[in-house]
Image (cartoon, grey):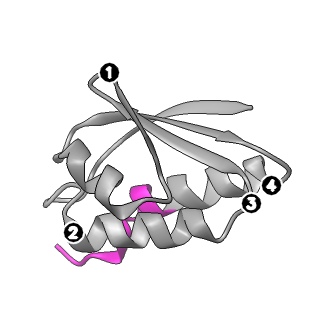
Amino acid sequence: MLTEQITIVNKLGLHARAAMKLVNMAGRFESDILITFKNREVNAKSIMNVMVLGASKGSNLTLTAEGNDEADAMTAIKDLINNKFGEHE
């Protein structure tokens, strides 16, 4: 199991489009992927759960991945977040 902290850096935070990109990315992996924010832990493969987090720019999330491809999943999701979900600000 891998656990890491990451900060949301894009201007609009984890809004609908960014959340969908995160969910789509998480869905590519076999591993269980969880996001924890403000004492709420959700499945990163569920759009409704990710949207409910309401994480804005500067929010610190804890990512947890567990499974055969956990390292690849963690790297891909961190890259997506650090690259501002591909948004041009």
Depth check, mark 4 against mark 3: the one in front is: 3
Which residue in the structure is indicated by mark 2?
Answer: 16
- Residue at horizontal 74%, vertical 60%? 30
Quadrant (top left/top right/bottom left/bottom right) for the C terminus = bottom left
Is 65 on the left or on the right of 61, as rendered?
right
The disc label shown at residue 30, or none: 3
Which percent across, then down, holds residue 71? 75, 48
Along the polypeptide, which appears first: circle 2 or circle 3?
A: 2
Q: Which residue is the extreme one toward the top? A: 39
Instruction: Please name the residue that numbered disc 1 is placed on.
Output: 39
Q: Give me the residue at 13% from left, 61% from top.
A: 12
Comes first in the chain, label 1 or label 2: 2
Label 3 crowd bin: few (<14), some (14–19), many (20+), radius 10 Å? some
Which amino acid type is shown beneath numbered disc 1? Asn
Q: Amino acid at mark 3?
A: Glu
Give the x, y percent position of residue 16.
21, 69
Marks 2/3: CA distance? 23 Å
Disc 1 element? loop
Q: Is residue 64 magenta?
A: no
Which residue is under mark 4?
69
Q: Looking at numbered disc 4 in the image, what kind of residue is underneath it?
A: Asp
Is any part of residue 55 visible from this angle? no
Indicate the quadrant containing the N terminus: top left, top right, bottom left or bottom right: top right
